[in-house]
Image (cartoon, rainbow, N blue to C red):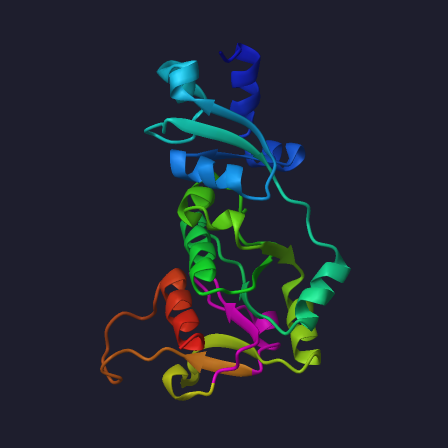
Amino acid sequence: MISKADIKRIRALHDKKQRLSERLFLVEGEKMVAEALESGFEVVEVYRTDDIGEEAMERISQLSSPSPALAVVRMPAEPSASEIDALIASRPLCLALDCVRDPGNLGTIVRIADWFGIDAVFASRDTVELFNPKTVQATMGAIFRRRVIYCDLPAVAAQFAAAGMPVYGTFLDGKDIYREDLSSSGLIVMGSESNGIGAEMAERVTSRLYIPPYPRESAGSESLNVAIATAVTCALFRR
């Protein structure tokens, strides 16, 4: 059973302010709930349609077509400065998202990072919230396996450079990514959907890359979707 007070409390988590205040978010779908239960995340509660009924599930669900299972999950603690320092010292390959605003794009990028074994995803503080329901669904469970760290992105880029690792960025005037020697460690910066990489982050980039169209002289679409561009870039780094 589920009480009216429980329904009100869970529905409150549909709101970003409440999610961040309570440090809780919702996960929906049998597969996603199962992955949450198998992860290191703390699962606070699990509700199933068979137990609470369709009407109650419709009231607590964030989806237009509610799934059979919903879980309330606690957000992980934010990493300390020393943990970030230790990560960078391990010479990882990481992504950096500069003002990515679309929740579906963010979720897809987290899924891409999981597929290609990217060590972590750094995000500027004006990037869309990771625990937005559309983002959570778009990760397809990768949210439980790949760390997303909101931070001062230029400062993190400076740390990578100071540690002797390249800071890559994708630009329309960059060098052909297919012809470049790509490092197995470093930071790959991807920009916003509308404006690309901002000026402050662009100053931190040490290697500018470009994904050319085919054929190279074609005059087709102006650019790639940021999630698609991230997939192509990660694939080339892992080639």
Residue 14 appearing in the image: no
Residue 49: image x %, image y %?
A: 39, 20
Horizontal and vertical percent for residue 51? 43, 16
User: At 33% from the left edge and 80% from the top edge, which residue is drawn?
Assistant: 212
Quadrant containing the C terminus in the rendered view: bottom left
Q: Compare residues 208 and 203 and report the one nearer the observer.
A: 208
Which secondary structure type mostly characterizes the magenta part of the structure?
loop
Q: Is residue 62 magenta?
A: no
**Residue drawn 57% across the image and 61% down it:** 120
Q: Pick whichever, 67 or 8, lies toward us.
A: 67
- Tell me: 174 left or right of 164: left
Q: Is residue 44 above or below residue 36?
A: above
At x 70%, y 53%, the residue is: 79
Magenta stretch holds residue 202: yes
Residue 172 appears left or right of 1? left
Numbered range of the magenta stretch: 182-206
Q: Quadrant of residue 209?
A: bottom left
